[in-house]
């Protein structure tokens, strides 16, 4: 967990979020470089701030966009991405599927088309999955026992057993087969220049070295020893070292949310047109855009991309509520709740969130807070009780200042 900033109920942050400034009229986000003032906030019991507020980026205004899911031409993707001759094709509910190669090198590709080619509405659109097996081995199958395949904070397995904890691996560090910089350049060239992905940024990156992979595999075996059942034995060598990238789509230097959040109510959008009333059903998972890539000495081994957007209409700039006001919304909300356990605001960030509309999505700027709630967990190994955190996302419309999440 990040260092918690708290002094009982009175919190003194050595920052002034309200003074965060924009870089220019174009809306590029900037870390506040002005004078650091004191902001005194009255916090409820068991509620803490766990992020460095001086690093929060902000802008004065941002556009609202109308968007649709980005659709890829399956045959074009196959032509540009697949290295071997296609030996089999099928159509599934998610979209067209391709298989290439032989036992030495085999590739699999699915291009999501929402079920169009299958004659159904699958709802899975705006991305693709690709994997390459070398000598009959799937690297992604190995990695599932060594690192989480999702962006965001650690899940309960990572906290309880540690074998898929991402933070054990160095970020942006070089591996022996290729530098991080060169690997990233090749991946972005493939995604954006060759396949036509929109502008992306690295949200998280991990350099998976053999030593740490072996340590995680031992933790994986240890976890299974407490539960019994069948466990999968794997062999790890230097050739298995790889980079894992998690990307986010970027619009006007503002990232698109890449984690799932829960809708809360009927929200009034600031777009000011027929889509102004958009239903965000309480408790329903809302769209997110996520792209993950695994790269090793053989090149790109695995791509998983979903929820990419294509902008079809731009609307005028709208003034945004300050970071301080957005944080106050969260604090006021939690002040009305009797918190029985430690609750921490782990992070806050200005993002675009996709709100479903009648004919696509509205992309609106929103303040996204990651909230961690402590739960007790008793280790079956030694009975030691430790906190395990569950995470949820508190989303505030950055134009209206209203809460959007449940």
Image (tube, rainbow, N blue to C red):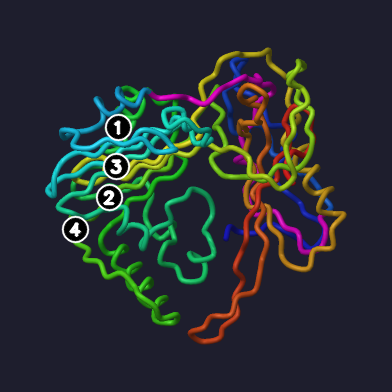
Residue sitting at x 77%, y 54%: 11
Q: Nearer the viewer, residue 259 or 105?
A: 105
Above/below status of 245 relative to 84: below
Q: Which of 333 and 1 is in front in this view?
A: 333
Q: Circle 2: is it few (<14), some (14-19), or many (20+) Cα within 10 Å?
A: many
Q: Name the residue under label 1.
A: 185
Residue 84 is one of the magenta-drawn residues = no
Above/below status of 378 relative to 186: below
Q: Circle 4: is it few (<14), some (14-19), or many (20+) Cα within 10 Å?
A: few
Q: Mark 3 points at which residue?
A: 180
Mark earlier in primary sequence (1, 3): 3
Q: Which element type, helix, strand or loop, lies under badge 3?
A: helix
Judge from the rendering whether residue 13 lies leftward or rightward of residue 45; answer left or right: left
Mark earlier in primary sequence (4, 3): 3
Residue sitting at x 31%, y 54%: 208
Which of the 4 image quadrants contains residue 87? Answer: top left
Above/below status of 308 relative to 297: above
Q: Name the residue under label 2.
A: 242
Which numbered disc, 2 or 3, marks the residue closer to the eye? 2
* Disc 1 to disc 4: CB gap under 8 Å: no
Q: Is residue 296 visible from the viewing direction of this image?
A: yes
* Mark 4 → mark 3, Cα distance in angstroms: 16 Å
Residue 65 is one of the magenta-drawn residues = yes
* Mark 2 → mark 4, Cα distance in angstroms: 9 Å
**Magenta extent:** 43-72
Q: Which element type, helix, strand or loop, lies under badge 2?
A: strand
Q: Circle 3: is it few (<14), some (14-19), or many (20+) Cα within 10 Å?
A: some
């Amino acid at each position: 967990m990040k260092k918690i900033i708290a002094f009982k109920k009175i919190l003194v942050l050595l920052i002034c979020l309200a003074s965060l400034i924009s870089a220019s009229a174009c809306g590029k986000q900037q870390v506040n470089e002005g004078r650091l003032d004191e902001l005194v906030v009255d916090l409820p019991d068991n509620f803490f701030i766990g992020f460095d507020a001086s690093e929060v980026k902000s802008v004065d205004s941002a556009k609202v966009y109308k968007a649709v899911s980005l659709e890829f031409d399956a045959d074009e993707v196959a032509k540009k991405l697949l290295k071997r001759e296609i030996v089999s094709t099928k159509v599934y509910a998610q979209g067209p599927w391709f298989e290439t190669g032989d036992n030495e090198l085999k590739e699999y590709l699915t291009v999501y088309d929402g079920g169009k080619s299958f004659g159904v509405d699958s709802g899975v659109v705006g991305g693709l999955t690709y994997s390459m097996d070398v000598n009959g081995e799937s690297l992604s199958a190995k990695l599932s026992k060594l690192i989480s395949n999702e962006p965001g904070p650690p899940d309960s397995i990572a906290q309880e057993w540690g074998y898929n904890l991402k933070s054990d691996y160095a970020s942006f560090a070089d591996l022996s087969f290729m530098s991080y910089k060169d690997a990233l350049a090749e991946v972005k060239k493939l995604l954006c220049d060759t396949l036509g992905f929109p502008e992306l940024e690295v949200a998280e990156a991990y350099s998976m070295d053999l030593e740490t992979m072996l340590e995680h595999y031992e933790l994986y075996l240890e976890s299974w020893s407490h539960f019994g059942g069948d466990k999968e034995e794997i062999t790890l060598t230097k050739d298995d070292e790889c980079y894992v990238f998690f990307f986010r789509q970027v619009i006007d230097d503002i990232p698109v949310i890449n984690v799932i959040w829960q809708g809360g109510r009927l929200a009034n959008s600031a777009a000011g047109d027929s889509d102004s009333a958009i239903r965000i059903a309480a408790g329903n998972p809302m769209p997110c855009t996520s792209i993950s890539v695994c790269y090793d000495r053989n090149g790109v081994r695995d791509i998983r991309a979903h929820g990419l957007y294509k902008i079809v209409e731009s609307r005028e700039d709208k003034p945004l509520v300050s970071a301080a006001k957005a944080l106050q919304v969260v604090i006021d909300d939690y002040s009305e709740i009797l918190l029985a356990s430690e609750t921490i605001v782990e992070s806050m960030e200005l993002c675009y969130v996709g709100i479903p509309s009648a004919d696509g999505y509205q992309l609106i700027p929103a303040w996204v807070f990651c909230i961690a709630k402590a739960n007790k967990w008793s280790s079956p190994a030694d009975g030691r009780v430790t906190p395990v955190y569950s995470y949820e996302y508190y989303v505030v419309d950055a134009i209206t200042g209203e809460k959007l999440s449940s």
